[in-house]
């Protein structure tokens, strides 16, 4: 469904990504593993139209070239991003955030159905729809962010470290919600530090190191991969 | 006497609130500090004057011309003059300084055109200039109409921004412009619309002001200044704040002019301004930063 080829991103002299090639098939869940500063966020940003890749890169969604489109058009094409730090409108209410999630033209016809789905996934949001988002806990804000992204009827949902800073209980809830989102047919592309949980959710994964892809494979083989075990799983034991 | 004074104060305050709402939208959403804002108001006052005198169109229906004209003019000004500045600043802090300098120049262009066309004299026309009995006091009908218009236009704008998806999108751009594209909002387009909407409010305010006040080609600066005070008092980008600060300012000015001395109105206004800034630097309704 989405094909990324030859993607390089640099900020001034700092090279964040070099010749990245990844793909996500329809309905697939793919995780990108990598240490801090490996370029994971830059990859998602480049796909979302928020970072400018070097010439020669290709990003295609269902064959349609996306590169060069502004971020709001990328969303309109069917790719929603939940960025690091969530990017929600904390001064507005839960309900207003979800309404804005359906602002895109592609989202308007299914807005009511998507809202039901979001409230089914996160009943807490239904209880708190009049609440200002800034007054909510980190986990609840992450629900708002994911709910808002789902409101746009995405084909591909991209998540940048969704479990960052959440209490362990919330992390469990988050991943079970992501599992249910998968079942609705949405493809997932996520960047995660929680390697165990994300590999049990994902079909496949890529390992990113210093801006290059150094390993890839299906989730089970990555779990046994010594590269992944040494680099991440040892440290992620208690997560 | 007191009732008349309070109603006159509310009229003046309602007008301040109306024009300040436009400025707070331009600054809060489009992030343009528009120093030519008062000139837009005065241009609309002249438009109402000409339509009334030369074509016999009363000020009330001329709002239907002034509002779209203000919208279109501001839309074009944004595209020609401000969009390049926005693009150059790349979302950085340079936009504020650049927009202040650019609109400072625009102020003199518009003012110059008006001076050439109409000269520097004080201008007024007579419209609904008869007394109406309100709670035993006689109040000019044109002032009452101005108050009603301020309430209707201000209230309409408030509902538009809080009850429609389009308005919610504009508020979203105001609070987190970098997050707006994540939900498919074209932040540049929203900024341009917000600037144009603010311009439409300025021209509505200008028509309303011309109904009961004299004005000259060079009185725009005073309105920019008053609107700016109201915006800062109320908290930047805050409509309810602009409304209450506008009313407060109008009441204080009128009360001081009537019971103390007309020469002290500006002094009183600045005392309140300083007091509020010392007590709540982000305005009466603004959120404390840091």
Image (cartoon, coloured by chain):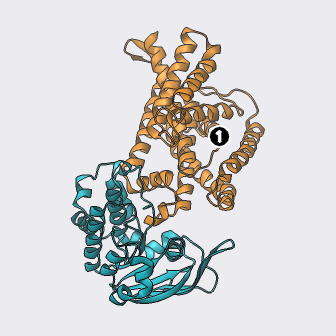
Label 1 environment density (alpha carbons within 10 Å; few <14, some 14–19, many ≥20):
many
Image x and y of residue B245, in percent: 49, 30
Which of the pair A1/A207 is nearer the observer? Answer: A207
Figure disc tally: 1
Examine the image and state in which quarter residue A158 appears: bottom left
Q: Is residue B174 visible?
A: yes
Relative height, residue B172 to residue A114 (above, below): above
Q: Is mark 1 on a helix, strand or loop?
A: helix
Name which residue lies at 45% across and 54% down.
B172
Which of the pair A206/A98 is nearer the observer? Answer: A206
Q: Is residue B91 left or right of residue B134?
A: right
Which of the pair B237/B5 is nearer the observer? Answer: B237
Image x and y of residue A163, in percent: 37, 66
Examine the image and state in which quarter residue B225 appears: top right
- Which chain does the cyan colour mark? A
Name which residue lies at 49% across and 25% down.
B248
Q: Is residue A220 left or right of residue B131?
A: left
Image x and y of residue A209, in percent: 53, 80
Image x and y of residue B70, in percent: 58, 47
Which of the pair A219/A100 is nearer the observer? Answer: A219
* Residue position marked by numbered label 1 in the rendering: B43
Relative height, residue B271 to residue A135 (above, below): above
- Which chain does the orange colour mark? B
Relative height, residue B91 to residue B226 (above, below): below
Q: Can residue A102 be seen in this view?
A: no
Q: Which chain carries label 1?
A: B
């Amino acid at each position: 469904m989405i094909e990324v080829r030859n993607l390089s991103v640099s900020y001034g002299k700092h090279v964040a990504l070099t010749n990245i090639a990844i793909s996500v098939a329809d309905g697939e869940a793919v995780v990108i593993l990598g240490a801090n500063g490996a370029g994971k966020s830059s990859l998602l940003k480049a796909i979302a139209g928020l970072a400018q890749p070097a010439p020669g890169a290709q990003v295609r969604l269902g064959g349609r070239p996306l590169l060069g489109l502004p971020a709001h058009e990328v969303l309109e094409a069917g790719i929603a991003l939940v960025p690091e730090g969530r990017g929600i409108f904390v001064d507005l209410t839960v309900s207003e955030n979800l309404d804005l999630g359906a602002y895109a033209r592609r989202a308007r016809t299914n807005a009511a159905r998507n809202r039901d789905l979001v409230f089914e996934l996160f009943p807490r949001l239904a209880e708190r729809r009049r609440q200002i988002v800034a007054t909510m806990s980190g986990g609840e804000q992450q629900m708002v962010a994911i709910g808002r992204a789902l409101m746009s009827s995405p084909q591909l949902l991209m998540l940048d470290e969704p479990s960052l800073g959440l209490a362990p209980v919330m992390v469990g809830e988050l991943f079970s919600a992501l599992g249910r989102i998968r079942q609705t047919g949405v493809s997932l592309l996520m960047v995660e530090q929680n390697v165990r949980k994300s590999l049990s959710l994902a079909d496949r994964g890529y390992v990113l190191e210093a801006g290059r892809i150094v390993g890839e494979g299906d989730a089970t083989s990555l779990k046994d991969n010594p590269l992944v075990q040494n680099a991440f799983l040892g440290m992620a034991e208690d997560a | 006497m007191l009732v008349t004074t309070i109603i006159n104060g509310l009229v003046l305050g309602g007008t301040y609130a109306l024009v300040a709402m436009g400025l707070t939208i331009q600054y809060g959403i489009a992030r343009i500090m528009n120093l030519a804002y008062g000139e837009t108001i005065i241009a609309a006052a002249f438009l109402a004057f000409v339509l009334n005198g030369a074509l016999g169109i009363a000020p009330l229906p001329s709002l239907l011309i002034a509002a779209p004209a203000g919208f279109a003019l501001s839309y074009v000004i944004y595209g020609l003059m401000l969009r390049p500045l926005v693009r150059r600043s790349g979302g950085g802090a340079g936009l504020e300084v650049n927009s202040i300098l650019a609109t400072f120049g625009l102020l003199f262009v518009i003012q110059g055109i008006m001076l050439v066309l109409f000269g520097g004299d004080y201008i007024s026309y007579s419209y609904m200039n008869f007394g109406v009995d309100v709670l035993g006091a006689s109040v000019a009908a044109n002032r009452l109409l101005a108050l009603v218009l301020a309430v209707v236009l201000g209230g309409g704008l408030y509902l538009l921004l809080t009850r429609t998806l389009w308005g919610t999108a504009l508020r979203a751009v105001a609070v987190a412009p970098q997050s707006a594209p994540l939900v498919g909002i074209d932040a540049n387009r929203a900024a341009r619309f917000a600037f144009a909407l603010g311009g439409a409010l300025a021209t509505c305010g200008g028509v309303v002001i011309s109904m009961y006040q004299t004005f000259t080609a060079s009185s725009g600066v005073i309105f920019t200044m008053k609107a700016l005070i109201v915006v800062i008092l109320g908290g930047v980008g805050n409509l309810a704040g602009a409304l209450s600060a506008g009313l407060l300012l109008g009441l204080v000015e009128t009360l001081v002019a009537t019971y103390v001395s007309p020469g002290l109105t500006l002094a009183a206004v600045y005392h309140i301004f300083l007091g509020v800034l010392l007590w709540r630097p982000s305005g009466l309704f603004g959120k404390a930063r840091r």
